[in-house]
Image (spheres, rainbow, N blue to C red):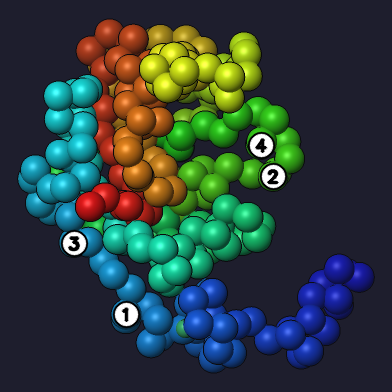
Amino acid sequence: MKIKFINDLRGIFFPDSCVCCGDTLLSSENQICTDCQLGLPFTDFSPVKENPVEKIFWGRVQIESATALLSFSKKGSVQRILHSIKYKDNKELGVYMGRQLGTALAESHRFDDVDYLVPVPLHPKKFKKRGYNQSEEIAKGIAQKFDRPVVTDVLIRTEFTQTQTKKSRFSRWENVSEKFALAETDTFAGKHILLIDDVITTGATLESCTRAILQAEGAKVSVAGLAFAGH
Ligand SMILES: [Zn+2]
């Protein structure tokens, strides 16, 4: 009760503001004002085969389908959204944006045979510090519009064994591919996994996650990101 009272007071003195532009939100608005929402740079990749997100995995690892909801650009509204989800404890925004990605996935019908939503795991130390995994919050939002179970305890991030800073570029790359593993291979055997990430850049993390998942016999992997920082 006490906490609720404080939250109500916060609403009076600090009304919610738009994550992107900082303007005060109307009571009908949530997280992002209508103008900013309409101005978001949607990629419209979800229904498109061989889209730019899929192309970054070509020649690297087998990905069935891939997409991202938004185009990332530095200093733009998408960067502010990602920053708020990742560093400002704004889990609700992760779920809110995840719902939009979930709608795009459902409407595209290219992801219909996906069995599980699997967020890219955080390193356990980071999870402990932040208290949540931003990709998991996005996955929860996706599941509200694209109804699949979110599985977080099969794909796991393994501990670092040595500091990465002293290693050469090549061995750093090797190290990346060893950061993920499956806790067990039965759950994903014969299943189509949709990997969820907040922002897709080089695809290195998703590539190593995919290699780990493909240890399960007959598993297939697709990829969905909230944003794509491609060229
Ligand atoms: Zn705004």
Instruction: Tell which of 67 and 177 is nearer to you.
Output: 177
**Mark 3 crowdedness (10 Å alpha carbons): few <14, some 14-19, many ≥20:** some
For the residues labelled 2 and 4, the Cα–Cα distance comes to 5 Å
Instruction: Tell which of 108 and 203 is nearer to you.
Output: 203
The location of residue 98, given as percent across then percent down, is 42, 56
The amino acid on which the numbered mark 2 sits, given as a three-letter code, is: Arg
Image height of 58 relative to 85, above or below: above
Which residue in the rendered view is the most extreme toward the right? 2
Asked if ligand 1 lies within 8 A of label 4, the reply is no
Asked if ligand 1 lies within 8 A of label 2, the reply is no
For the residues labelled 2 and 3, the Cα–Cα distance comes to 31 Å
Residue 2 lies left or right of residue 160; in this view the side is: right
For the residues labelled 1 and 4, the Cα–Cα distance comes to 32 Å
For the residues labelled 3 and 4, the Cα–Cα distance comes to 31 Å
The location of residue 140, given as percent across then percent down, is 48, 48
Residue 133 lies left or right of residue 73; in this view the side is: right
User: Quarter-wise, where is residue 25 in the image?
Assistant: bottom right
Image height of 230 relative to 61, above or below: below
Residue topped by disc 4:
127
User: Quarter-wise, where is residue 193 in the image?
Assistant: top left
Q: What element does badge 3 sit on?
A: loop
Residue sitting at 45 percent across and 63 percent down? 79
The amino acid on which the numbered mark 1 sits, given as a three-letter code, is: Gly
User: Quarter-wise, where is residue 177 in the image?
Assistant: top left
Residue topped by disc 1:
39
Disc 2 + disc 4, Cβ < 8 Å: yes
Residue topped by disc 3:
44
**Mark 4 crowdedness (10 Å alpha carbons): few <14, some 14-19, many ≥20:** few
Q: Mark 1 or mark 2: which comes first in sequence?
A: 1
